[in-house]
Image: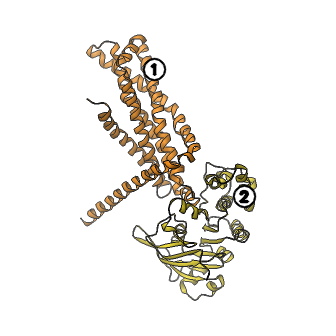
Amino acid sequence: MTTPLIKVEGLRKSFNGQPILDGVDFEIYRGESVVVIGQSGCGKSVLLKHIMRLLEPDEGRVIFDGQDIGKLSGRDLNEVRLRIGMLFQSAALFDSMTVAENVGLCLKEMRRHTHAERNRIVMEKLELVGLTDAASKKPDEISGGMRKRVGLARAIATDPEMLLYDEPTTGLDPITADLINDLIIDLTQKLDVTSIAVTHDMTAAYKVASRIFMLYEGKIEFDGTPDEIRASDKATVQQFITGRAKGPIKVR
Amino acid sequence: MNYGVEAIGRHSVSLISRIGSFFILIGRLIASLREIHRSFGLILEQFYLVGLKSLPVIVVISIFVGAVSAWQAAYQFKFIGAPPRMLGQGVGKAVVMELAPVLSALAFAGRVGAGITAELGTMRVTEQIDALHSMGINPVRYLVLPRVLACLVMMPFLVIFANFVAIMGALVVSIVGVDITYETFLNGFRDSFKVGDFINGLIKAGVFGLVIGVVGCYEGFSTQGGAHGVGRATTTSVVLSMVLILVFNFISAVILFRL
């Protein structure tokens, strides 16, 4: 039987006594493109940050390719992190650096490439996201959509096996959002990566996902394909995917 | 009543948690010294940003510190009929042992400490520090180590300039405003000058630099919330640094200048 690339077991996390994740369990296999949907503030980004171990769980564990990442530290943890790329909600670009420097930072710090190799990889990644012309610009000189694409180029700089997208289309106009969705699909195919995206944008979810999880009250409320979620008879699922204010889900 | 007890408990837990995370940062900072060779470029950049760029403000402050010290000392000496050469002695001692290190450190806390906290705090709330983690880069080695080392090394360097400029400021005021010759002032200064006092002043400056760097980085790293959180962290950083400078000044004086 195939080993899952990511296995999450009994993950629990509270902030100030308020449970956000209340026993999350799932497995994701290589090549899958998973989208996690749910209300704003339901813990989608928190879940993603646990996978990268940017947050420590109160209970439970995250296993990446057979390794419990909660037990790793120092170089071992960094090696796992280099196998996972992450696009942050705000893109999280370093504003003192140019676009090219942002994309190349990780390669520079890894010290495994010559200067020329690094430049070649940076330009290659920027070409994949269609931003070679912006290489020498600073983050504040480019648009929100371009910043997300730079964040994406930075996330794929080390050729990761898995990509995590935190709200990749939030705050973008519908056309730019669709461009980002196409880019995610394109990169997933070209780079043969497994991906997890969190979003509340159902258009993006249907377009990108091979499997959708719905997070509700700290647990996985639904796990299935886009067709299965459309056909689901769960009231919470139907309320969320059709975007209705009235229903069992309380508006926060 | 219950509310009061609950509030005290909550604040106590928060304080213990802050102290704990402060010492965790110190531990990580010490551990990151093993990788110092990977941060030489960043350290040199911080030497420039933290040290050389602070020089103009330290020079301006020091001119007036020296000038006002000479004026006030002359005013007091007039009443007790002290000999003119005592002006150089008194001002020299005050500047080298106390005024240059302490006032430079307070200005440094306002300029550099606030800058460090605001920068790192903004990086925290915009997920840039998380981004460093995600790229396998140790943020303490990448951000904290260069800034703390720059503060530790550049603070004494700035105090050397502050000493010189303050004495020059005092000299000019003594000649122009108090009508003392420069030989009298400098002879008085030379009589009282001890290399030990000067070195102790620089040691104090190093301690103050360390305090400013560590507090600035800690407050920046523990920033929560958005712009409001950054503002609050920056204020806390400056106030805490200034208080600690004065506390450590007293402790240093007791240790370094034995009665």
**Image position, residue B36 (x, y; %):** 53, 46
Q: Residues within 10 Å of mark 1 (few under 14, many from 20)?
A: some
- The numbered disc on residue B179 is none
SS for dot 1: helix
Please name whichever residue, B174 or B137, is drawn nearer the observer in this view of the structure.
B137
Residue assigned mark 2: A126
Q: Is residue A141 visible?
A: no
Colour seen for chain B: orange
Location of the N terminus of chain A by quadrant is: bottom right
**In this view of the protein, which residue sits in the foreground, A79 or B124?**
A79
How far across and how far down the image is residue B160, in percent?
46, 28
**At 43% across and 42% down in the image, what residue appears?**
B210
What is the display colour for chain A? Answer: yellow
- In the image: residue B97, left or right of residue A219: left
Give me the residue at 50% from left, 75% from top. Answer: A251
Residue furthest bottom in the image:
A233
Q: Nearer the viewer, mark 1 or mark 2?
A: 2
Residue under label 1, please give it.
B168
Q: Quadrant of residue B81?
A: top left
Residue B215 drawn at (x, y percent): 42, 47
Could you tell me the amino acid type at mark 1? Answer: Met
CA–CA distance in space, label 1 to label 2? 56 Å
Chain ID at mark 2: A
**A46 up-or-down from B132: above or below:** below
Instruction: Name which residue type carries label 2.
Output: Leu
